[in-house]
Image (cartoon, rainbow, N blue to C red):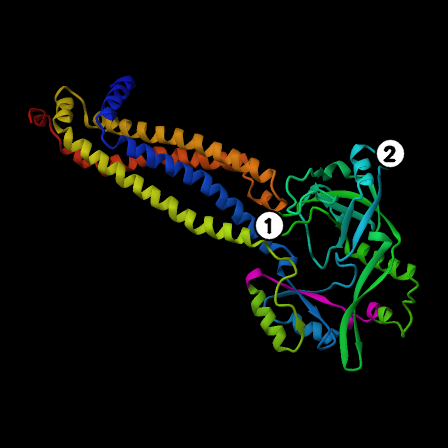
Amino acid sequence: MKYSYIRFLSKANIKGNRKSNTVIVLMCLLVIACTVISCFTAVTGKALNEYKNDYRARSLELDPWLLPLTDDAISSIESVEHVSSVDDIAGFRSVCMFNILDVENEKGNRDKIDEKIKNEDAAVYVCGLIGDEEKTITAGKNLDDSPIFSCIVPSLFYPFEPETINYEDLDYIDGTTLIGKTITVKGYNDNVSVIYNYREDAYSGNTDEIMPSPEYKLKIVGTYYCTPAKSGSFEDILVSRETDLKMTEMALESAGVNLSSKDSKLANWWNDSSLHSYYVVADDFDNLSYIFNEVSKMGYAIANSPEQLINDSTVLMANLFGSVGVFLIIALFILAIITLVQSSVSSINERKSYIGLLKAIGYKNRQVFACMCGEQLSLTLKGFLIGGTLSAALVALTNYIFIHGAYQTLVYIIDWRLFLFFICVSLVVAIIIPLICQVILIKKLTDIQPINAMN
């Protein structure tokens, strides 16, 4: 039998199918669930995993306020199960904001971006990487392959005072346009601050020292990806641990601190590692509570929450789409199959004489099967087209809203390649469901004989 005959009979059968609209609506909802919900599940799940794997999200701050953090103390803490490392964090530690004084290329020239940064009171935080902390480099080189006083900037860079308190619709600078240029920074209002620990007799604690800031010239060698899953670091310039320590030492020396003096609290802190603070890094985010309890039992002062916190909304969205989304997709899939099976059963029962007549005039079982399958396939593909169109429109709308929203909403932007993958999955589902239904009913079809044409 020609394909055109099968198509003609399928269309004719659809007109008599009382559940055709129900099938189309269910298929439309299933496609929307498989594409939009699956995309958001993938996006939020990825963001949550990126956060949990981040070095600072797995770090608890350890301070020498209760007991000095001697080499033996550090060794005992490192031996605690699930502790990956214990890393010294003496230095600026991202507590200092720096004004940008100048941005220029190797020839000393500037372009519009550099002038904008220079003329709009731009300011950034300069943060030193700790331990084996790594960032995903999106362009250029990483800091391990670069000399001292190199830096990397966010791929989406915004060092200006935002016009709205929610950081909405910011006009980000493409960080890659700054690679190869030198940025000159100086402490905010010409000052820098260093937080240091001290111990006097039975008393201990920490305080900060405000001092005049030197100027620092940092060569931009690359850009890094900063996940919007946390509070945002689009104004953080990252330097190596060596650069961070050198910048701190320069600030201390320019302030007249004698680093060899034993009468200076700052000098004692700088030279005595037992007065430093540390990061206790877990091998897995889920083991932070265990590490906190074990180190606390040992008598040391350790924070009960990680250095870097994730947005509550990201956790909520990840859990919502991860559980409710999967349940909804499975429920719609099962409901679609049940509805199609019921539709097919009703169709077969109502058309026994019709099917018998087809067989009487020479149609074989496989040809009748093809007609019935074509009927259901036409309904599911129509639902797929409607659902796919609505899904694309919904993704385009949400992407537009998120792009112009706060920095944190960038985490919900759906890559169109991801959407294309799930729309292809939906197409496969739209084709497979009718086949499953007809396979279930194939025996019922074969039991109908030409004699049924007389009934």
Q: Is residue 393 above or below residue 253?
A: above
Judging depth in this view, the residue of 346 and 390 nearest the camera is: 390
Drawn side of residue 329 relative to residue 297, left or right: left
Is tag 1's residue or tag 2's residue first in the polypeptide sequence? 2
- Rendering coords of residue 213 (x, y %): 87, 55
Q: Find numbered disc 2 in the image and state the secondary structure of the residue it sits on.
A: loop
Q: Amino acid at mark 2?
A: Asn
User: On residue 109, which mark appears?
Assistant: 2
How dense is the environment of label 2, judged by Cα within 10 Å: few (below 14), some, or many (20 and up)? few
Query: Which residue is found at the position 55% from the left and 62% from the top?
Result: 286
Q: Which residues are magenta?
A: 269-286
Query: Which residue is found at the position 57% from the left and 60% from the top?
Result: 285
In space, the residues marked 1 and 2 are separated at their CA atoms by 36 Å
Q: Is residue 85 above or below residue 6?
A: below
What residue is shown with label 1?
229
Q: Amino acid at mark 1?
A: Ala
Q: Is residue 170 above or below residue 50?
A: above
